[in-house]
Image (tube, grey):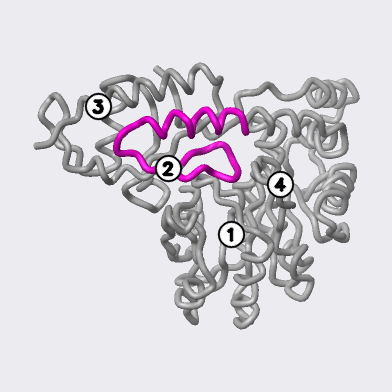
Amino acid sequence: MIDLSAGLPDFETPEIIGQAAKDAIDRGETRYTAIDGTPELKAAIREKFRRENGLVFANNEVMASAGAKQVLYNAFMATLDPGDEVILPTPCWLSYFDIVQISGGVPMPLPTTLEAGFKITPAQLRQAITPRSRWVLLNSPSNPSGAVYSAEELNALLDVISDYPNLAAMADDVYEHMRFTDAPFATPAALRPDLRDRILTVNAVSKAYAMTGWRLGYCAGPADLLHCMKIVQSQSTSSPSSISQAAAVAALAGPQNFVQEANKSYRLRRDVMIEGLAKVPGIECRPPDGAFYAFVRVSKLFGLQRPSGEVVKTDTDLTDYLLEAVKVVTVPGSEFGLEGHLRLSFASEEQEIKRALVLISDAIGNLTYV
């Protein structure tokens, strides 16, 4: 079986980070910490934002959580009343939908297209806003599409948001360091200081430093919002793991060569994936500018018949077929709010990617017209 569904790096956590965790254990740093993070970690988070994003935050404007997912949970639980709406450009990370609903909110999908680079326009956003809209969640680079918004594109969206005083922007920057263009990374808070009190920036050490299992996310935003989020966290998980926090300090404050080398590897793997997909009949693909996913349109294959006689009618039918026929695991686009697509991860060795694409091509070649 070849797994192209994985949403995590296939690299090991860098040794310097693991050693920092071991050292913390040896020092006996195994007790509860401050709910929103140790002083050392908060200092490292603040310095990361200053060094990489040109953003200066006070100590009470940053906090750490048990993964970026908990940051989202804290924010929505702290701000959403029943029926409040969160605008989600789709395709988007599938957890967004459930976290909003658990928090009493209403997810409002805003579909994009392959032709538009899986990005929303200001006109689309303005049309989607209602009196119940509270957040617009912008994920760049995107999971699952790999779309990356430029500074100009983000500014145009933020111009729309600025016209609605009850609307805030949440920037999910978890894939910040996985980009394949030469343009500088753009994040809303750095672009629009005038909207500083209406922007929450979310990040984590999980993807950039191959630390998914360490469960350490962080955020920066208005102090009053983070105060409420801290209250939510205090009655759910309390502080993140003390050992994970020590490891995250080493990740954020230490040498960044691992991040750069990993990104080079992802770029090469992306090129292998795109080159291979171009040879697969019926699949339409736009090269992703970031993250480690190809989000491909497969609707041209709908209506074709499997050798067993069943007809492929949905993207879920196609993922089932690929799993059963050639043992390649993919994720249907409908899981991310956009039917007719598949997400293929290239966080795998190049040879595995090549082998998977040959198998996918063979399987699709065995589909016939009814």
Q: Which residue matches tag 3?
A: 365
What mark, if any, has residue 182 been given in the picture? Answer: 4
Q: Is residue 249 magenta?
A: no
In terms of sequence position, does the residue under pointer 4 or pointer 1 come before the other?
Answer: 1
Whether residue 327 is situated above or below residue 158 in the rendered picture: above
Q: Quadrant of the C terminus?
A: top left
Q: Which residue matches tag 2?
A: 285
Residue 369 appears left or right of 24: left
What mark, if any, has residue 138 been given in the picture? Answer: 1
Specify the quadrant of the image occupied by residue 177.
top right
Specify the quadrant of the image occupied by residue 161.
bottom right
Residue in the image at 45% along x and 31% along y: 5
Q: CA distance from mark 3 to mark 1?
A: 37 Å
The amino acid at mark 1 is Leu
Measuring from the top left, give residue 171's x and y in whole percent: 65, 58
User: Which of labels 4 and 1 is toward the front?
Assistant: 4
Q: CA distance from mark 4 to mark 2?
A: 21 Å
Q: What segment is highlighted magenta in the picture?
A: 267-294
